[in-house]
Image: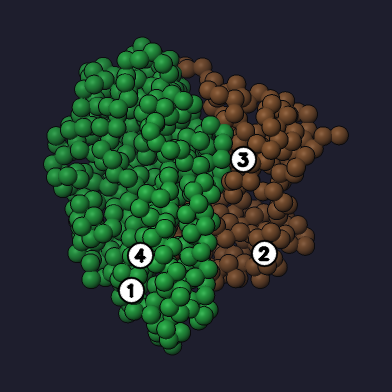
Amino acid sequence: MAELRGTSGEGPNHLLTRWFGTPDLHTLAVYEQKADGYKALRKALFDMEPAAITNEVKASGLRGRGGAGFATGVKWSFIKRDTPEQKYVVVNADESEPGTAKDRYIMENCPHMVIEGILIAAYAVGASQAWIYIRGEYDGPYRMMHEAIEEARAKGYVGDKPMGKDFPLDIRMYRGHGAYICGEETALLESLEGKRAQPRSRPPFPAVKGAWGRPTLLNNVETLATVPTILNMGGAAYAKIGTEKNPGTRLLTVSGNVKKPGVYEVEIGKTFRHIIMELAGGPPDGRKVKVFWPGGSSAPVLPESMLDTTCDAEALAAAKSMGGSGGVIVMDDTHCMIRAAHRLLKFYARESCGKCTPCRIGGDWAVRMYERILANEGGQVELQNLRQVSDALQNGRCLCGLGDSAGWVIDSTMRHFYSEYEEHCLHHTCSVEAVAAHA
Amino acid sequence: MSALSEHLLDEIRELPAHYPQPRSAVMPALDLAQEELGHLTPEAMSEVARALQLDPGYVEGVATFYSLFHLRPVGQHRFYVCTNLSCMLRGANGIVDHLKETIGVNDPTDVSKDGLFSYDEVECLGACEYAPMMRLDHQYFYDLTNDKIDALVAERKGAGVKTAGVEAAGVEAMSPPNPPRERGGKKRKASG
């Protein structure tokens, strides 16, 4: 395996990653012996009522780590447990948000932690079958998860009577085939059902009508991997970590122009200055942080002057951004904002599923505007068009958030770096790249 | 004469039973077809449709939606180089330029003359702490440099040279060349 880049071993508030780096942690034996492995599952199956498990997760204040940040325990409680129909747990392992690698980090280092979380969740909501939807490019994590499931099956933790408890729990895997949109929960369900991955309109919500028309709990890998920790330490104790409204720790992937890119587990509420300048070592020598995306490319950008923003959902909302998937992308002052925005719009245009017109058409429009601007053919018209497209993409005009995210890239880069847009459009120059070329 | 082997079609016909609803088998089935042929021909898609009792247009609709299904020939080895932001900020575009020159392919739809190589510029592959990075066939490669690209291309040109040489070039290999094939969650007996 490649060298670990990021948090591993003992450290303040290393709840998930404190055992990372332990040799053979990916095996069931080491996970059990050295990492309190499957202790929480045992507790859940034999010492707790299903409703009590959900309440414990509620008490922890855990919020989903996939992007939307919905309260996990509340989501669990939406599933009516005591109905006879088949229910499913579907695990979103389709990590595709640009700048996000934390689910891969967890699955490669400690697949059993994910499996334990899945089994606990399935038991709590009364689902006898769980499906892990994993992106097709993740060959390594797929193999590790697959082997870990088989190990757990052989040990009797997955199967008809997990640990002897009369409640069948099965875990299966389904591979994605390259589509960012599958990270959106209803698109993921469509894909799992063998269809083009186009988001569904809601209601009905997955908790009522999800995978194959059945009640379904959808959670992200990191969210479920946190569940064993919560049961082991108690929801109330977990809630004391982090901020009041956004408790706990989360794994932030810090990438781009930093000296030590990596996946860092941080207590929620730390500042981005701490995360980028201290943990990730700051930008290369002689350069400055220009801008950062605090939660994947879909989170509106924040300029260097906002490095003291804390990484909790409330502070980020106040800064007109969001925590998203925890992908912190750092760009230094040798890079042009317009070029970066162009690249991201190309991404959103390419990944639009085509279902909603504003997103299908708007992304391409924006890309064309950026291409003209970068070819020094831009002017007031292009600026005006970008504004209009950005507006059309946002504000609930599409079924899912992909269009909004594309609009936010335009909006937030214009909000904080309008002078660069003007320079490109009105003077047909880029002082950033001119300086970089001479450096 | 069918495009897909009889043995493979048998395997495909068994897939639907492994899912709560048969339709879910369409992607695993297309996987098998692509593995056998290298890319999905119209005939192959029709045969998959027939084997799964689905409409051919439906199967093609699924195949065209997902980027990992190839609808035209690809090289024996395919480079998927991430050029999204985290990799772009660390030089991914230069890596792509160098790769194109090295394998003599100018466009993602082309294949090198010897049939060995093709490439694509892809979106984030979820290994951003190792940027710039790429997926080559079924392996991830990290901290890319032009020299690493050269070494990987040279090794694949000289058939028989194995991964040892890659590691000597300092390239990290993340996964085995052939990951376990998805068998669609075959029903397994619980042992315990």
Mark 4 in CB contact with mark 3 (< 8 angstroms): no
Q: Nearer the viewer, mark 4 or mark 3?
A: 4
| CA distance for labels 4 and 3 | 33 Å
Give left or right: position of A148 versus A418.
right
Element type where label 2 sits in the image: loop
Residue B29 point in image, percent of width and height: 65, 33
**Do the residues indicated by labels 4 and 3 lie within the same chain of the protein?**
no
**Do the residues indicated by labels 2 and 3 lie within the same chain of the protein?**
yes
Q: Chain of mark 2?
A: B
Q: Chain of mark 4?
A: A
Q: Nearer the viewer, mark 2 or mark 3?
A: 3
What residue is disc 4 on?
Answer: A411
Reply above or below: A278 against A334: above
Element type where label 3 sits in the image: helix
* Shown colour of chain B: brown
What residue is disc 3 on?
Answer: B62
Mark 4 in CB contact with mark 2 (< 8 angstroms): no
Q: Quadrant of the C terminus of chain B?
A: top left
**Do the residues indicated by labels 1 and 2 lie within the same chain of the protein?**
no
Reply above or below: B61 against A76: below
What residue is disc 1 on?
Answer: A417
Residue A277 point in image, percent of width and height: 26, 66
Element type where label 4 sits in the image: helix
Q: Amino acid at mark 3?
A: Val
What residue is disc 2 on?
Answer: B107
Q: Residues within 10 Å of mark 1 (few under 14, many from 20)?
A: some
Q: Chain of mark 1?
A: A
Q: Nearer the viewer, residue A417 or B30?
A: A417
Q: Amino acid at mark 2?
A: Asp
Residue at (26%, 70%) from the top-left corner? A304
Q: Chain of mark 3?
A: B
Quadrant for residue A392, please give it.
bottom left
